[in-house]
Image (cartoon, rainbow, N blue to C red):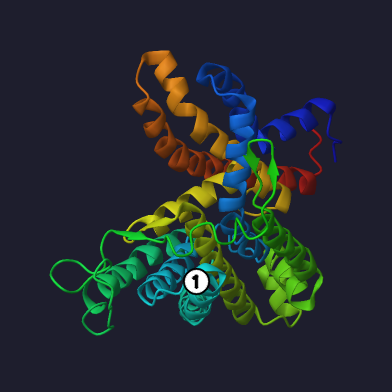
Amino acid sequence: MKELTTKDHVQRLLISYAVPIIFIALSAVAIPLSGFSGTYLVQEMMTRVARNSFLVLSLIIPILAGMGLNFGMVLGAMAGQIGLILVTDWAVSGIPGMLLAALIATPIAIVLGWICGSVLNRAKGREMVTSYILGFFINGLYQLAVLYTMGNLIPIRSAALVLSRGYGIRNAVNLQGIRHCLDDLIPLKFGTMNVPVATYLLIGAFCLFILWFQKTKLGQDMRALGQDMAVADSAGIPVERTRIIAIIISTVLACYGQIIFLQNIGTMNTYNSHDQAGMFAIAALLIGGATVARATITNVFVGVVLFHLMFVVSPMAGKELIGQAQLGEYFRVFVSYGIIAISLALHAWRRQKDRERARRSLRGDTA
């Protein structure tokens, strides 16, 4: 078998990290054009890392189990939003309100995760597209619940939440009661910059949980599934049960991540917030250098910083280039879908090349 040359190693490195390299180059061009100060960008990145990291981290466990990118994480986001609607109606504010929302949303997220995992077990090898379509289906049920049952079957007392017809939740829900309750729990200020210490501590605890979980028996079973499902099945690992557990964990964590995300924002788009959270979280993970088959905690934080750095600077950079800040807004949507498409194409291409390389090595082809 032919040993890889330095050129081969460099080529593999460039292919593996093509997406983050592209974004670093774009950022290097866009940051000077935007005119933003370093202090402003650092503050924005601290806020956005705290706001989005929990959601992105929830994607790691299904990847560990070989199930690819969990587009079904939006199911957990919907569960979190239902919990927030109810605690807002009950006027439970602060950390107790946030905890109550998580408590209400957890059983909903578990049920939705079980449904998603059961469906994906019947679509092995096509988990990503199946979870994406399943997200649309459950979204229809969610829309039905908040648009027709809330105020009818589910009593909603707050007139500020209900549509003028007497039932259904308004498009925008004010989360003033829990806004920044976690971010401001442990106040810390460096000059003009606010650091959400409590949120970072919670994210740090989640990272430690992931590292610990990967070393457990269940984590090792998921890793074995990710490497070869047939071999794992032959070794006595309950494949379908383990896959369902992976999706349930991811869905519940996405539920908590959406609650953290929305307490930072302070307002909720009832019918669209979960869609944006799912797509942006997946795009951020891929921009950090993750693939469909492998993702690490480092990929999460690198991706969140690069992705949201472009979000911040692209409108002003677009205005400087062509006089239209709206270009940056279009660029955000283009990036979200484009990066996912590029990453999936690169993953398929790499798998094809690896298979060709394996066939050549079996034939003893050194050419």
Residue drawn at the location 44% of the way across and 59% of the way down: 129
Residue drawn at the location 41% of the way across and 59% of the way down: 274
Residue 83 shown left or right of residue 68 in the figure: left
Name the quadrant of the N terminus.
Answer: top right
Asked whether 297 or 127 is in front, the reply is 297
Residue drawn at the location 43% of the way across and 14% of the way down: 321
Residue 8 shown left or right of residue 181 in the figure: right
Q: What residue type is disc 1 on?
A: Leu
Looking at the image, the residue that sits furthest to the left is 165
x and y percentages locating residue 9 in the rendered image:
79, 32
Name the quadrant of the C terminus.
Answer: top right
**Residue 288 visible, this angle:** no
Q: Is residue 340 above or below residue 137?
A: above
Quadrant assignment, res 167: bottom left
Q: Is residue 273 above or below residue 151?
A: above
Q: Is residue 235 above or below residue 323?
A: below
